[in-house]
Image (cartoon, grey):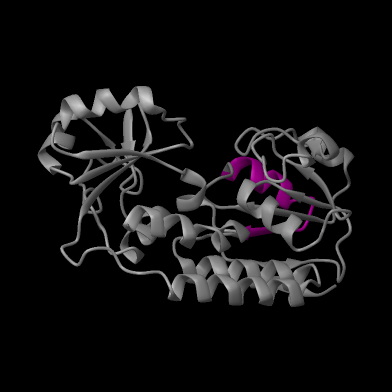
Amino acid sequence: MPVFIDQMMRKVEISSSPMRIISLVPSQTELLYDLGLNNEVVGITKFCIHPQHWLKEKTIVGGTKQLNIEKIASLKPDLIIGNKEENSRAEIEVLMQQYPVWMSDINNLEEALQMIESIANITQTSQQGNQLITNIKLEFELLPQANPSKKRIAYFIWNKPMMVAGKDNFINHILSRLGFENAFENQLNSPQISYRYPQITSTELAAAKPDTIYLSSEPFPFKDKHIEQFKAICPFAEIKIVDGEMFSWYGSRLSLAPAYFKTLIA
């Protein structure tokens, strides 16, 4: 069987034409759909909401970090596609003992495009994949930069406890690409708290003095009702609810993201 190298630098033997694919990551599930692999995908997670009709048509194998290993086994997959950040290491290691598991590890746009190219090659959809990559590159090249004064952004992914995008993650890369400064890129925390998505206090948020606070629609579903909570902490900051899929989905949704970002920059 052909051998492919995943983004964790693992050698993975995969059938030359995988016909029973399980995707464990929402953004990569959407990519498989846009590559035209409707018949080949047999299993997805309950968070794989695009395309919506797949939630009824495909077998749900649990959540991204709470997989139903028995249900996965019943599907007899010849390819499982996961992600280092989004999936549980322990569960992935169990699956690796029995199935070809190709893992992505994405912190920037270049790595996202590499993932798209690799999955297209594995699934023999290179023509569709190359066209998608070309479109994404063009859209990002045409994307204007924000004000050179480097507006400081605090990007929230969770509430109670409050958690923000820190450094070495895809959201931080996108903020930088847009010409913004991440107010918590260099936030120092205790060893128990990830510098990638640090937990912060109201005092730390006030001290950071962000120009703008982005409240992401996912993974925590921030709504307009949460704006007052943050306005009380940072009364002079602009506070916006933003589409988390545009900032953190690193599959084919990237072709839609630049048009959305233009509205934020404007």
Q: Is residue 22 magenta?
A: no
Residue 4, by quadrant, is bottom right
In the rendered image, residue 35, in percent from the top left (x then y), is placed at 75, 63
Left/right placement of residue 77 relative to residue 113 reads right
Quarter occupied by the N terminus = bottom right
Q: Is residue 175 or residue 243 the one in the foreground?
A: 243
In which quadrant of the rendered image does the C terminus lie? bottom left
**Figure label count:** 0
Q: Residue at x 49, y 51 (%)?
A: 246
Q: Is residue 175 visible?
A: yes
Rendering coords of residue 236 (x, y %)? 13, 37
Magenta-tinted stretch: 89-103
Residue 101 in view of the camera: no
Q: Is residue 243 above or below residue 16?
A: above
Quadrant in which residue 158 is drawn: top left
From the viewer's perspective, tell me whether residue 256 is left or right of residue 234: right
| Nearest to the observer: residue 144 or residue 246 | 144
Q: Which residue reaches farthest left?
A: 207
Q: Is residue 97 magenta?
A: yes
For residue 260, above or below residue 108 = above
Measured as percent of width and height from the top left, residue 184 is found at 23, 48
At 26% from the left edge and 23% from the top edge, which residue is drawn?
Answer: 229
Give how far across and how far down residue 177 sits, in percent.
Answer: 35, 66
Out of 151 and 27, give the one closest to the viewer.
151
| Residue at the image point whose x is 30% and y is 47% from the top | 195
Q: Residue at x 85, y 56 (%)?
A: 78
